[in-house]
Image (cartoon, rainbow, N blue to C red):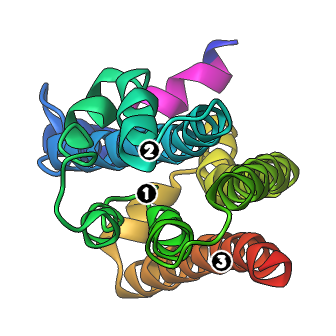
Amino acid sequence: MRAWVTPMFEGPSARRLAALRGNDRPPGGALRERFAELLRGRGKEAEGWSAAVVELCDGLGAELVAGRGPEEAMAAAVEVLPSPQREALAGLPSAPDVPQALRELAVRPGAEALRLLAACWSIGVERGAAFAPVVDGLAGALRDDRNHRAAVRAQLAGARTTARLLAVLPALGLAMSWSLGADPLSFLFTTLPGLACLAAALALDAAGLAWTTRIATSAEHGEDTGRT
């Protein structure tokens, strides 16, 4: 057993890596973690706004069917939204130009459909068309779109996970060769051919991961475009 384990923790490459790493995280580790947290926060914000827009359209349509005026119906629909969206939309019912206010709010991630609601408001309120059926139709279309996006993301999750797994397989290969008594890190980090191989491998690995991610993202966006 020791013959298998000892080479993994001894040798110049192991000591070199330990000296380089020290007891702290890599210098870019905190930055990467912060960037990942920022992306997750933006994703949650976009999802929250997307759900809130559907809820807003549902509430607005229900209030219009109940006989309320557009401004009063908008105020009642905004009142039941989650706190972040409710605060952002609080001044909407009393805005002098509601469609323009909706278009300004639509720049937020996930709130793009507010532009469609602005168009519905212009058609229904300013031009006298039937407003409630239009808003109900918009709410149904947005709900179907959200469900479709969720289904596409679920189908692509496996492909994305497989791509990430394949990206870390070279590290597993290095660990296996190290356990067999070889010292691949010395070759990779101390010789010119090794450095060239390392650079090429990292570039190809990153390119493959980016390519697979782009294919999955394109498929998701392509589905959305096809539905639109």
Mark in the foreground, 3 or 2: 2
- Contact (Cβ within 8 Å) of mark 2 with mark 1: yes
Residue type for callout 2: Trp
Q: Residue at x 18, y 34 (%)?
A: 25
Q: In x, y percent, where is residue 6?
A: 52, 23
Determine which residue is flagged by label 3.
Answer: 208
Dot 3 alpha-carbon crowd within 10 angstroms: few under 14, some 14 to 19, many 20 or more: some
- Residue depicted at 27% across the width and 42% down the height: 89
Q: Quadrant of residue 65?
A: top right
Side (left or right) of 12 relative to 225: left
Name the spot of residue 77 as percent of width and height, x first. Answer: 46, 32
User: Which residue corresponds to the image point at 83% horizontal and 54% vertical from the top-left?
Assistant: 148
Q: Is residue 218 above or below residue 39?
A: below
**Tag 1: residue type?**
Ala
Contact flag, marks 1 and 3 (Cβ < 8 Å): no
Q: Is residue 117 above or below residue 155?
A: below
Q: Residues within 10 Å of mark 2 (few under 14, many from 20)?
A: many
Q: Earlier in the sequence, mark 1 or mark 3?
A: 1
* Between discs 2 and 1, the one toward the N terminus: 2
Visible residue check, residue 81: yes
Q: CA distance from mark 3 to mark 2?
A: 33 Å
Specify whether residue 11 is in view.
no
As drawn, 26 above or below 1: below
Q: CA distance from mark 1 to mark 3?
A: 33 Å
Q: Earlier in the sequence, mark 3 or mark 2?
A: 2
Q: Is residue 6 magenta?
A: yes
The span picked out in magenta is 3-11
Query: Which residue is label 2 attached to?
Result: 49
Residue 147 position within the rendered picture, expressed as x and y whole percent measured from the top left: 80, 46
The disc labelled 3 sits on which kind of residue?
Gly
Per the image, the residue denoted by label 1 is: 111
What distance separates the C-alpha of mark 2 from that of mark 1? 5 Å
